[in-house]
Image (spheres, helix red, strand yellow):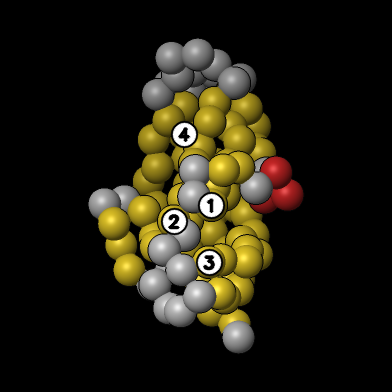
Amino acid sequence: FGFVGDTLQYQNGDYGHLIGAYDFSVSSDVNNTTLQSAVFIGGVLDSTSLSSTYLKTAGEYFKITGIIAEELMNNDKVQIMLKSDKAGAVINTASGGTQIQQIP
């Protein structure tokens, strides 16, 4: 794996599998916001990766977690994206991370 900008890129042969998990502490500047996370492979949404959390109070941090289980081709790019149901909401991340592992 390598990084291209803010994107993880698979660079290990023709084909592989990736498993992992992520978790982030997130907040919104708007009350009563539903935040959704998802994994994108090569810019395409993996609909099985969708996860969501409800942010009740603006400025308060909540956890959002998800699982990554993907089949990758060489040079595929992996992104974790966050989306709010409130247009214009500012989403902040305070901490978090990802754990990934390639399996043969």
Name the residue at the front extreme. Answer: 14
Instruction: State if disc 4 and disc 1 touch (CB < 8 Å).
Output: no
- Foreground mark, 1 or 4, reads 1
- Foreground mark, 3 or 1, reads 3
Q: Amino acid at mark 4?
A: Ser
Task: Give the class, few, some or many, for how many residues have Cα within 10 Å of label 2's Cα (few <14, many ≥20).
Answer: many
Residue 27: numbered disc: 4
Q: Is residue 26 left or right of residue 1?
A: right
Counting from the top left corner in percent of width and height, residue 35 is at: 58, 32
- Please give the residue where the numbered disc 1 appears in the rendered image: 41
Residues under labels 3 and 1: Cα distance?
Answer: 10 Å
Residues under labels 3 and 4: Cα distance?
Answer: 34 Å
**Residue 70 to residue 95: above or below:** below
- Please give the residue where the numbered disc 3 appears in the rendered image: 73
Residues under labels 1 and 2: Cα distance?
Answer: 6 Å
Mark 3 or mark 4: which comes first in sequence? 4
Which of the image's four quarters has the C terminus? bottom right
Q: Is residue 67 left or right of residue 87?
A: right
Q: Secondary structure at mark 2?
A: strand
Q: Amino acid at mark 3?
A: Met
Instruction: State if disc 2 and disc 1 touch (CB < 8 Å).
Output: yes
Mark 4 or mark 2: which comes first in sequence? 4
Counting from the top left corner in percent of width and height, residue 30 is at: 49, 18
- Front-lying residue, 51 or 60: 51
